Image: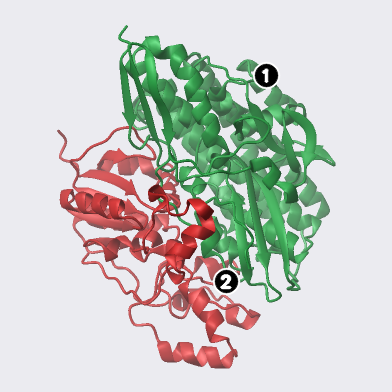
Amino acid sequence: MSNKPRVAVFDFACCEGCQLQIVNLEEEILDLIGAVDVVEWREAMSEQSSNYDVAIIEGSITRPEDEERLWLIRSRAKVLIALGACATIGGINKLKNNFDLRDVKKWVYGKDAEKPHLNTELTRSVAQVVKVDYLIHGCPIDRKEFTYIMRCILTGKKPEIPEWPVCVECKLKDNRCLWETGQTCLGPIIRAGCGARCPSSGFRCFGCRGYVNNPNINAAKDVIERYGLDVEVLKRKMNLFGSGNTQVTANG
Amino acid sequence: MDKNIKIDVHYITRVEGHGNIKVSATDGKIQEISWIVPEAPRFFEAMVRGHSYEDIQTIVSRICGICSISHSFTAIKAVENALNIEVSKQTDMLRQLLHYSEQFQSHTLHIGYLAAPDFFGAPSVVPLVPKATDAVKTIIRAHRVANEWSDLLGGRTTHPITIIPGGFTTIPTEKQLRTLQDTIRNTQKDINTIAEVVLSVAKNIPNFERDTEYVSIKQTNPPEYTFYHGDIASTDDGKLVPVKNWHKVTNEYVVDQSTAKWTKWHRDSFMVGALARFNNNYDLLTDNAKKTAQQFGLKKGCCNPYMNTIAQVVECVHICEAAIGLIDKILTKGLVSEKVKVKVRSGKGAGVTEAPRGMLIHEYEFDKNGKCLAADMCIPTNCNHANIQKDMEKLVPEIIGEGQDAVRQKLEMLVRAYDPCISCSTHLLNVEFVR
């Protein structure tokens, strides 16, 4: 038996795009495989195990059976990592919570909506169900941030995750403010760490990394007034990635 | 050989999403063969209601991390159809170039990481790293090129941020496109190497056939091996169906064994994906792609579903050549900065593209302010579920004498050959447009 930490990757309701970012480490993934023992990763491997030190969880929780499975994983893992927006803040799946669930099921499955296997409940992030040790934000996650946090975990250091808004990174890049081009950008209230990737490509920040812990609400109010925004429209944009008003912090 | 079989694969591995296989037989008599999809449904069609036409692709891209570019494009095409938005030739060409990158990324991922371990008798690519280091590194290199290609045009590798209804938020420079073209040229060698490696283990691809219907899009004006433009075509019937009539093709229905809906057209089931495109559009492949097919004995009309992975290899060869040619066309025309103009109106529209794993359809309806009233989608893996079930029903009696482990292995390989994207497929719906 090697002394390397045993790592398992699990997924719940999600698009599996964050796991794909681990694969997208390309050559670097060979280093990762060298540093840890990957004992279960359904999307990439057939091996399975109930004995692991670190559990990486992608996806949000939408059914009682998923909650049970998550508790089991939590009880087995020494360290639990929430991977990506679905796991950290609920992600796009949380849009469903804005509707009556019976209506949502009926809309999708019509007369079959009440069949038991089509059951769904309010979407929750992993962090809303069990204790999470580390949060890796984003939709999808940033590959560099993933390797940084993994390195911190393996070397026993505390990762530093930005506590300032995307605007800070955007300004550093000298980007033109997207508000001036007529876009409703969430940069002022969303946690940085992505390198302002979307605004740098000319696309508004839509909030996939969740709110900063103390968003500057007064500044946001000023912006709403200055650009004559419709509050309902803004609310829809702010709810897009399930940021909502749930604030989560990891112990990390 | 023991003819008692009890197979219960809970969450088949090395596929996107969750699927189970159940087979039981006593004394060679089969009691049950089921392909079951227990994936948590995510209800996208319901969730997009009320959102602006501008936010649709950002939401539905999240249906699938592996085909996020195809979902974004299909949504954008549907939005443009609904709002009557025309795009420039330049936008159209750059979009196709970006769309190629996703086919290439997804195919190399499937061939190298998900399917190949079966051909080598390994549980995953990990044990192959020390044994076949060069082959693994070649796959990684090709996969990286595909991702850099998506990155350049889409703003990042997964969930693109540059493509919007009407055009792009930002486009690459001509110099960057020239560099990309060189990179793709260099990658052609790697694709040939990958083809050779797969060929060396191709004897492990099961020899199984079941005649079925193959459905994909087809482009006739001008004729091209298409992933992006075209009408719906079937190997059962020469008539092309425009996307607005897509419900006549998919005929979705709910079954108890699945949270994903099933589909059927002329028969009980049909198949979509690389093999379907190959069977419908073979004549339009490049000569080199045809040669690659020939090396594997893959011919038009092939009805061995396991050969879908080989059709992906063939498409990789084609895509690289087509992309190099497309970049030439873009550069000859020269890039100009374009401003996206959209006039919002009410309307309903549909769009279709080929995702790497098959035909993908979205449809939306908007009010006069561009707010989404209704959405409907048909995802490729949904189209394949019924076909997978029918394949299993024919396959199991043929191989039952080979014993439990071999049956299980071949069934898992069968599902993987379809390159299913199961989390996608649990978002389909056949929605009545209710007001």
Q: Earlier in the sequence, mark 2 or mark 1?
A: 2
User: Which chain hosts label 2?
Assistant: B
Q: Nearer the viewer, residue A149 or B302?
A: B302
Residue B199 in percent (x, y) is at 54, 18
Residue B344 lies, with reference to residue A77, above or below; the image says below
* Mark 2 residue element: loop
Q: Nearer the viewer, residue B107 or B43?
A: B43
User: Which chain hosts label 1?
Assistant: B
Picture quadrant where residue B192 is located: top right
Residue B396 in percent (x, y) is at 44, 18
* Mark 1 residue element: loop
Q: In this rendering, which labeled residue sits more in front, label 2 or label 1? A: 2
Asked if residue A161 lies left or right of residue B169, the reply is: left
Q: CA distance from mark 2 to mark 1?
A: 47 Å
Name the residue that disc number 1 marks. B299
Which residue: 14% across, 33% down? A1
Residue B198 lies, with reference to residue B320, above or below; the image says above
Q: Which mark is residue B50?
A: 2
Residue B175 visible: yes
Looking at numbered disc 2 in the image, what kind of residue is underneath it?
A: Gly
Q: Nearer the viewer, residue B34 or A45?
A: B34
Looking at numbered disc 1 in the image, what kind of residue is underneath it?
A: Lys
Q: In which quadrant will I find the C terminus of chain B?
A: bottom right
Which residue: 21% across, 67% down? A251
Q: In which quadrant will I find the N terminus of chain B?
A: top left
Do the residues at discs 2 and 1 belong to one chain? yes
Which residue: 59% across, 81% down? A179
Residue A194 visible: no
